[in-house]
Image (spheres, grey):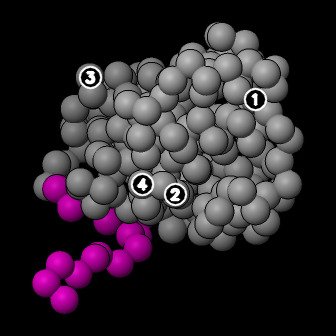
Amino acid sequence: MDNPQSPVLADDAPPTALDLPMAEPLPEDIAAYFAKCEEKLGMIPNVLRAYAFDPEKLRAFSGMYNDLMLAPSGLSKLEREMIAVVVSSNNHCFYCLTAHGQAVRALSGDPVLGEMLVMNWRAADLEPKQAAMLEFAQKMTSASSKIIEKDREALRKVGWTDRDIWDIAAVASFFNMTNRMASAVDMRPNPEYHAMNR
């Protein structure tokens, strides 16, 4: 093969194919953030390690991620993770499918749901609201210029508010960006993700 893919990374391996070492010393706030990740997750997610060469970029990335995925919203945390997986499936993003597929398993308690969303979300037994949400996220990913009022109205008809539609669009947009970045730099997920919540 002309462009062989690197194997799944060990924890001490570089998180991407780029030679961008972590800033040293890490600023106090980032060191504390990483310590919290180690405590809660048992690892520092490689996406954070990848951005750690530039503390300002890491703060910007983490701030946007935390706002979209953890802040109060009409979308549950699970629904936001479902969008992440469906967008990442459409984009064939290995990193995000692995990391956010694990989050779907953890939040839903259903390992089958995580696999269905990765392979074909339409095979999953979803509520009409969730199906409409994922249909919209997929269309945003594959043909965003073709979104029209009818698409937004389909979300309203199943109970999503205009604020919810903003959040659906924002989460889908964020993961379209992160998928492309992860693919461009060959970002690899932490090995731990593969076995968690099975």
Q: Nearer the viewer, mark 3 or mark 4?
A: 4
Residue 91: which numbered mark, if any? 4
- Relative to 75, 60 lies left or right: left
Residue 144 in the image: x percent, y percent?
42, 34
Q: Nearer the viewer, mark 1 or mark 4?
A: 4
Determine if the magenta segment contains residue 78: no
Cα distance in 3D space between marks 1 and 4: 23 Å
The quarter of the displayed image where residue 68 is located:
top right
Name the amino acid type tagged 3.
Glu
Name the amino acid type tagged 4.
Asn
Residue 89: which numbered mark, if any? 2
Q: Nearer the viewer, mark 1 or mark 3?
A: 1
The quarter of the displayed image where residue 81 is located:
top right
33 to 3, vertically: above or below: above
Q: Residue at x 31, y 25 (%)?
A: 27
Q: Residues within 10 Å of mark 3 (few under 14, many from 20)?
A: few
In the depicted view, which residue is nearer to us: 62 or 31?
A: 62
172 to 192, vertically: above or below: above
Residue 76: which numbered mark, if any? 1
